[in-house]
Structures are given as C-alpha cells and as structure tokens.
Amino acid sequence: MLRNLIPRTSPPGRPAVLLCAVASAAVMLTGSGVLALGGPGDGLTGASPPPEAAGAGSPPAGGPVAGPVTPAPPQPAVTPSTPPSTPVTPPRGVTWPPNRSGTGGPDPDEGQPPVVRVPESAAGRYRRAGGTDLPPAGARGPVVRYMVEVEKGLPFDPEEFAAAVHRTLNDPRSWGAGGRMRFKRVDHGRVRFRVALSSPAMTNRQCLPMQTFGELSCWNGRRSVINAKRWGQAVPGYRGDLAAYREYVVNHEVGHALGHGHVSCPGPGRRAPVMTQQTKSLQGCRPNAWPFPGHRKR
C-alpha cells in the first residue's frame, strides 16, 4: 500500500496505490461494498505494493510469518474505507454473508459494539493510552512493543480502544500465531509501531502524501492510522459485524507495520486474506479479519 503515491492533483476516480493500494479519489458504495475509493491503508497506489503492503489491511499474502518482520519503509499505506450509513440489521430479503463463526451476520455469541457517528475533525492532537498491557500468560515468541494513541475530541475512550487493539493483536489467530511473536503495549520508550485512532481530517493529514479523502486508513511509516469513521461504522461488506471489521482493520494496518503488503482475493467464495483490501472491496471473497484464521481461539 505504499508505492506510487497519487499526485495531490489527481482527479477523483483515478486509481492509485500506496502502501494499502487505494483506488479512487472518492468512495462509492453499493449494497455489497465499495466500488471505488482512494486513500491510505486499503489502497492508494497504482503499481505493485511493497512487501510490507502485502500483509497489512488486506489478507496476508501467504502463510504465517516466521518471527518479527523488518518494518516497512516509511511510506504511507492506505486502507480505503466507506462510510456505511446502513443499520446493523439486514434489510428484508438480504442474507448475511458468513461471519467469524461461519453462520452469517454478527456472531450470536459475541455482542456487537454500537455504531458510532464520528465528527469529521477533532482536536488534532493525540492522547496516548496510559499504562502497560503485557502479552497473555503462556504466549511465546519475540516481544513486539507498541503504543496506542487516540485523537482528543473523538467519542472513543483511549483505554478502551487500547484494550481492543491489544486483545486483537494477541489473539492466537493474529500475527503472533504459533509463537511467531507476542505484543506488549507500553506508554513510553521505544516501540516498533503506534496504532493511532484518528478523525477523518487527522487521518488525511497523517497519511500524506497519500490521499485518504476522509474515508480510508493507512500505514504512514510511523503509525498504523485507523480512521475513526471506519472504526465507528465499518463498511457494507461486513454486513453489520462491526466487531469483526475492527479486528480486520487493526490486523491489516499493523500487518503493514510488520512488513506485509496487499494481496488479492484467491477466488470467488474463498476466505479473503487479511492483507486483501477488504475495506475497498471483498473482490468476491468472504470477509476475514485474521492472518491465521485456522488457529484455535484461546
């Protein structure tokens, strides 16, 4: 999602790719997903994405990653997002696609967070989530240190957001699967990457020179920038499973931070790799939030 940055003068609708290969200056939604978008994280570049882009924001381009990955070059990665305004319940006659439990729609055994309307801009300054979150007991692999930041003025609590990120990254289906690595959240000192929840306006600034159009997320070489609009509303392709989409966008953008690039849907009806630009389009695949979905949940 990092390469071939779009010129600032590129007209909307012209595909471009960055670290997350976003595709258009505007986001067009359909009942099943986004037709065209442009922005960080899920796609803002035109040519082939760098190695790091192959695994972030979209399904991973391969199998498990052995050990810590060399961080990608400081080029932004964009994850396209579409602001869904649809309710979390399906319209009459619509069937939910398969979800994390394979039944379709939101998981019956897991509560869904409420859809949240997010302001276009907030304070323009980050507040760091305080404290430390250790890897789970019994987790194996090299420790990867990271920080979490939330833009001031957003309707999300920094500690709650940090807890969601930490839970996702240390899930056995995430990047640490099989003892590849484990994640420790800190609030000071050196870190491998930062995860920053940002308003659409702040995302636009953080992801420059990529253009996110207030809709996408990105990896900018320092931060996995999560667009708060996407965090609060998900995208139509996830059919109301906001919890799963949040897991996806964290795994995708952190995947870029770990050196993974974008990959395409392997075929209609198959599970999308996490480094696929699912915010932009599922490309005929089924939604999937995890790099290693086959690993047993703790």
Image (cartoon, helix red, strand yellow):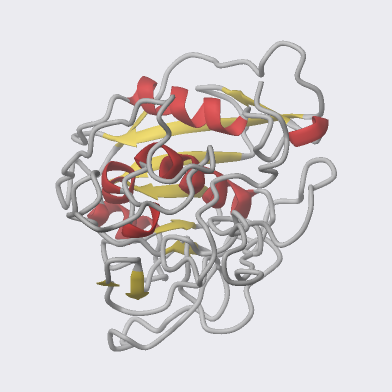
How many discs appear? 0
User: On the picture, is 280 further left or further right than 229?
Assistant: right
Image coords of residue 267 (percent x, y):
63, 72
* Near-viewer residue (78 or 230): 230
Q: Please provide percent x and percent y for residue 189.
A: 59, 26
Q: Which residue is farthest right?
A: 66
Tell me where residue 122 sits by quadrant. top left
Q: Quadrant of the C terminus?
A: top right
Q: Position of residue 73 (x, y in %)?
A: 65, 61
Q: Residue at x 62, y 62 (%)?
A: 270
**Quadrant including the N terminus:** bottom right
Front residue of this view, candidates 263 and 45: 263
Report the residue that reaches farthest toward the top: 137
Query: Would you say 248 lies left or right of 146 here?
Result: left
Q: Residue drawn 37% across and 73% down?
A: 38
Q: Which residue is at a point 50% across and 54% down the rendered structure image?
A: 287
